[in-house]
Amino acid sequence: PQTIYLSDYKVPAYLVDTVDLRFELFEDGARVHSTLAIRRNPDSQESAPPLELDGDSLVLESVALDGTALSESDYENRGEQLVIRSVPERFSLSVVTWIEPQNNTRLEGLYKSSGMFCTQCEAEGFRCITFFPDRPDVMARFRTRIEADQKAYPVLLSNGNDVDRGELDDGRHFMTWEDPFPKPCYLFALVAGDLVEKRDTFTTCSGRDIDLRMYVEPRNAEKCDHAMDSLKRSMRWDEEVYGREYDLDIFMIVAVDDFNMGAMENKGLNIFNSSCVLASQETATDMAFQRIEAIVAHEYFHNWSGNRVTCRDWFQLSLKEGFTVFRDSQFSADMGSPTVKRIEDVTLLRTAQFAEDGGPMAHPVRPASYMEISNFYTLTIYEKGAEVVRMIHTLLGPELFRKGSDLYFQRHDGQAVTTDDFVRAMEDASGRDLSQFRLWYEQAGTPMLTVSDEFDEGQGVYRLTIEQTIPDTPGQTNKKPQHIPFALGLLGSDGQPLPLRLASDEAEAPTERVLELTEGVHTFEFHDIPSEPVPSLLRHFSAPVRVRYPWTREQLLFLMNHDPDGFNRWDAGQRLAVDVIQRLIGSPDDAAIDPRLVEAYRKLITDTDLDQALVAKMLQLPSEAYLIELAESADVPAIHRARERVLEHLAEALRDDLVACYQRQQETGPYEVTPAAIARRSLRNTALGWLLMINDDEGRALAVRQLNEADNMTDRMGALRALVNSDYEADRRQALDDFYDRFRDDPQVVEQWFSVQAASDRAGQLSDIEQLLAHPAFDWKNPNKIRSVIGSFAGQNLAAFHNPDGSGYRFLADQVCRLDDSNPQIAARLVTPLTRWRKFAPAYSSQMQSALERIRDKDGLSRDVYEVVHKSLA
Ligand code: B3K
Ligand code: ZN
């Protein structure tokens, strides 16, 4: 496979003004008629370049130029490209292709899912539909006519407004859609199926009524309300916070069962993975409700950050993804608890994105090269990209940031632009110089900040020294220091925040400051400090960096109790727990568990004055994945045992408090998805899980009762998970069987049922996983099922996956090879846990390496998997 470089970017030689599409949909295939209005790009330097159109898996039926059929000598069909050597300055090109959506298992382009036709064109799926300059800087106005059997496909949808419809012979009908906004072809969408429609309306800030429509299979008709409400909240929020009004008259959402990703922001016609949009109290957990709200918002926000202003090329992917993730996380923070949302975002970043940034696939937020763009929809592009935008927000402050985003949208509306254009708009609106800040887009790797301090009692001066280093990553060494906003506070011995005086004569000093690090080493002096303070570093996680500082356990306990920044209170608890667990790894000495940790947790469980949403988060011990990320040379079974020992120790010591906490949190009113209610359920289910860890019979009885009486999926799943992870084997079996019988007809719930087993060290040993793969509800063509069994096993059931005999690795390699032919995008994603092989102790890493080699040696490896495996072994 070829490597594509950003430095090779050239403007397109030809532009497309309009695209006229006609789809004839049949059971044995689809005929696509496309007519393009094409002209030479005045900005292109090339003289009389050939016309080159991208194509993939297309059967070419005919080509005509300005109405005259071309013969095969007039063009060259190279399979992946259709080349016409000589064309006029301006012309119309008509191409007819034949495709087979019913056999499309890659789920890119036009394919079938549960009997309906649907599309996924980002990044390069449109070329699987027809020949086209498939690059985001070619923006055209689309008109789409869909023809299909009326009975099987009563609903026919595409982007924009419906402008015509009618009946045809043989029981067929058609519908025509027109999208007035020029767009890149990756935002094209088509849906045809037997779907029910749910309607609502939204009145925009300028008083326009927007028709909101959701399309789902009839059995899902009752699962649309939450997404619809989330959509309306998103539309209002984007008007209020970013001044962005919706632009078309219709906004549609469609739910599809077979989907490679979460959802897709096609103009006016968002397509969602069913699991990311459908919800009811009985079938979706609180986490699912929150995820749906966030994804609906994310896709909606793309209408401006992505669609109205799009990417020039795929190296700029974070332009739309990083910014839009930042926007959706601001939205979720506003809808719920900002501190909890920050904790969740940082947890994902520190476990998964830091691991990516420290591994063989590390790449900058704006990569310089790739082989397969599908491999670059990564945590770095999305989550680190969002952190980079957040840092601009922190450096500029909310008002200037808003000025910058207004300027960006106004200046680039209708254009395909770069991350540099985004930063320039922020600079121009604020007057700030972000030239050094741009390194965040260019340099990969997680910066490490090493912090040291000294207190000069005589002078009342506290000196803080911060050194920044950025590790080498593939292809990048000797990095330059980056511009890092570092928020901090200092706490006095009474726990009160101290004024931060950077000069001795500073009168009104704030108790929190954002220091700006730009050099390798900085020293800051704080004056009038009465006694040795406890520093609260990197508040709100103001930059995506690691911090090294020699915290004592006393300091961490102090911060857990006193830090006014909720995020840092949580973080202090995590650091303390990490320290306790790490001490235990490989040591059998139970007495080593610090009693102060137990007391800190007792306080969390018993003190009802604390913010319960934060308490629910603070009770979660650092995950195995995070402990692995922190380890030098990870021995996963040892990490797993140490963490379990701490959990069991805590559960035993706090047993009565846990029962009391469980009872106190009993639900009284009707089910609600509010931060307080979510926290209540989370606390209860945590208590239950801990009690079952120690085989507590009262806990077992509570779990069984909760399972039988639950009126919502959060409680049902909480009880099921607790039983599945317990030693009560008979109860576990019974609970799993009952659960399956009850929900066997609901694919989204069956996916949760698969996942809770595959992720469990009790119910998810390799032989169990093999049984799950043989289960009638498992489906090799459905990405959700693959993720819920294979993904959960390799990504969450870490002790089983890292079985010292290497069986987990070989298993994963086999599944990747099996999926490589049918769905390369999913296969490449599944490889991820193996790519981290260098992170593990030698006995493990050598076997992981062999598993990668086993995949490498498969015949006809896809470009997707090839890139990941070769880069990992390099
Ligand atoms: N933009 C889509 C991602 C599509 C990826 C295709 N390989 C979803 C999103 O980020 O909103
Ligand atoms: Zn997105």
Image (tube, rainbow, N blue to C red):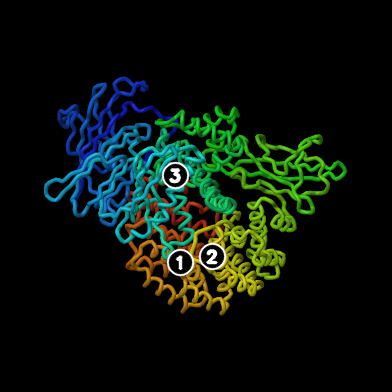
Tag nearer the camera, 1 or 3: 3
Disc 2 packing (10 Å; few <14; some 14–19; many ≥20): many
The picture places residue 233, in percent across and down from the top left corner, at 46, 48
Q: Nearer the viewer, residue 598 or 863?
A: 598
Tell me the SS state at disc 3.
helix
Q: Amino acid at mark 1?
A: Asn
Q: Which residue is the site of mark 1?
A: 712
Q: Which mark is residue 847?
A: none
Q: Quadrant of the N terminus?
A: top left
Q: Nearer the viewer, residue 247 or 778?
A: 247
Q: How far apart are labels 2 and 1 at the CA level?
A: 10 Å
Give left or right: position of 293 versus 462: left
Q: Amino acid at mark 3?
A: Met
Q: Residue furthest right?
A: 458
Give left or right: position of 327 versus 585: left
Disc 1 packing (10 Å; few <14; some 14–19; many ≥20): some
Disc 3 packing (10 Å; few <14; some 14–19; many ≥20): many
Marks 2/1 in contact by CB < 8 Å: the verdict is yes
Q: Is residue 166 visible to us here?
A: yes
Q: Which mark is residue 681?
A: 2
Q: Which residue is the site of mark 3?
A: 235
Q: How far apart are labels 2 and 3 at the CA level?
A: 29 Å
